[in-house]
């Protein structure tokens, strides 16, 4: 409107001609001139205007009580039905989206994050699955392929995966771990979730034989196992890039499984050769090999026994102080003892909201 007014003042002419020059409908120019003369905003949201006064306090209370999901917020429809005479659906939707984004931003900022800094000392193991169709190889029975994976947390080094058409049972997981320990050297700790096959007695027996101490992730807390979760996302992306939209000659499950095993080796080899910013531009293979040669991260049988005895004492004292009993309390006390020891020795750092927490002896 300022440009139209300036042009008319300098060159003259009618508003109809000026509106064509500006590429704006003449009716819009006239409507905006009238609003400008009355001192009103030139633009309004479309639709009928709300006539009831906005009960802002009640609205804020109900907004804070909404349950946010990653894509939707439960209760938004009912809230709009309550305030439809006071607030448009568009405005309410924008407010809810802003609240949802802020909720997950604060949730992520308050989560405790563990930075693993000791290559070769702490491993993690987990299971992963994908659909044959997701890989672009066709439809087979059984419909899924499974991976049992192990990873060194300090270096991000991925070890060879076990690829099967069913979830690997505990005995197979134990045999696989024993083979990896003999080839790469046993870590001091191994982190795992609460899956039955990962907590099988055969797995515990092999961990005891190599004096590797397990750390079970707390239930329903994904950030504790975030390292291997991120590696699985990288792996799936790489695997899809190999198989999707390519005419692979596959006749049955055996051919498809052999092809997936070959693709798995290729993807993990590439990921282990990535130069990662979190490793100061080095590769996982290099950091792992250098870490294995560092005496700070090496523990013989006698030292492992001493560490285990200290951790067991710390966990027992924690349970005695809290007066809690049961399996979950014992797991929590053990995690606290391990975390305290690792922080004391400088093998991990813990941050909340990207701020590193100090260690208190």
Image: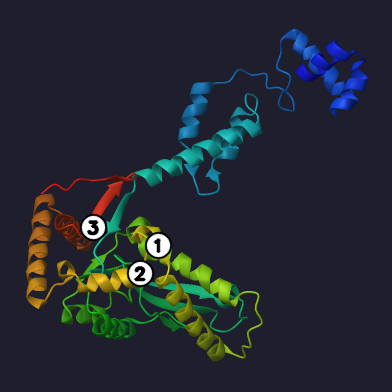
Query: Left or right: 209 with respect to 50?
Result: left
Q: Quadrant of residue 41?
A: top right
Residue 340, relative to residue 312: is it above or below?
Answer: above
Say which residue label 3 marks.
348
CA–CA distance between discs 3 and 2?
17 Å
SS at mark 1? strand
Look at mark 1 in the image and give the residue it sits on. 276
Query: Left or right: 276 with respect to 44?
Result: left
Q: Residue at x 40, y 62 (%)?
A: 276
Which quadrant would the N terminus be assigned to in this image? top right
- The 10 Å Cα crowd at callout 2, few under 14, some 14 to 19, many 20 or more, is many
SS type, badge 2: helix
Residue 360 sits above or below residue 91 on the image:
below
Q: Which residue is mark 2?
A: 284
Q: Position of residue 180 (x, y in %)?
A: 29, 82
What residue is shown at x 43% (from left), y 75% (from top)? 268
Q: Earlier in the sequence, mark 3 or mark 2?
A: 2
């Amino acid at each position: 409107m300022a440009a139209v007014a300036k042009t008319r003042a300098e060159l003259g002419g009618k508003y109809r001609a000026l509106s064509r020059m500006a590429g704006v409908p003449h009716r819009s120019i006239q409507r905006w001139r009238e609003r400008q003369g009355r001192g009103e905003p030139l633009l309004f949201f479309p639709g009928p205007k709300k006539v009831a006064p906005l009960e802002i306090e009640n609205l804020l209370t109900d907004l804070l009580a909404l349950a946010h999901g990653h894509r939707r917020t439960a209760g938004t429809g009912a809230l709009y039905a309550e305030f439809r005479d006071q607030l448009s659906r568009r405005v309410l939707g924008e407010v809810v989206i802003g609240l949802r984004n802020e909720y997950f931003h604060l949730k992520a900022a308050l989560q405790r994050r563990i930075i693993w800094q000791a290559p070769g000392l702490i491993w993690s193991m987990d299971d992963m699955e994908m659909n044959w169709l997701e890989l672009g190889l066709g439809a087979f029975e059984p419909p899924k392929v499974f991976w049992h994976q192990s990873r060194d947390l300090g270096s991000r080094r991925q070890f060879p995966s076990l690829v099967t058409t069913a979830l690997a049972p505990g005995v197979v997981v134990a045999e696989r771990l024993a083979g990896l320990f003999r080839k790469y050297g046993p870590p001091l700790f191994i982190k795992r979730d609460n899956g039955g096959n990962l907590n099988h007695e055969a797995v515990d027996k092999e961990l005891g034989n190599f004096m590797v101490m397990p750390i079970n992730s707390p239930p329903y807390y994904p950030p504790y196992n975030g390292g291997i979760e991120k590696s699985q996302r990288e792996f799936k992306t790489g695997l899809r890039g190999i198989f999707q939209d390519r005419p692979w000659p596959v006749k049955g499950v055996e051919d498809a499984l052999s092809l997936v095993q070959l693709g798995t080796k290729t993807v993990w080899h590439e990921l282990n050769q990535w130069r990662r910013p979190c490793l100061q531009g080095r590769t996982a293979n290099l950091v792992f090999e250098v870490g294995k040669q560092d005496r700070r991260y090496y523990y013989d049988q006698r030292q492992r026994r001493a560490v285990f005895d200290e951790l067991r004492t710390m966990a027992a004292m924690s349970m005695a102080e809290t007066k809690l009993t049961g399996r979950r309390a014992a797991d929590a006390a053990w995690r606290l003892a391990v975390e305290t020891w690792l922080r004391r020795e400088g093998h991990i750092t813990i941050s909340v909201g990207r701020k590193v927490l100090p260690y208190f002896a």
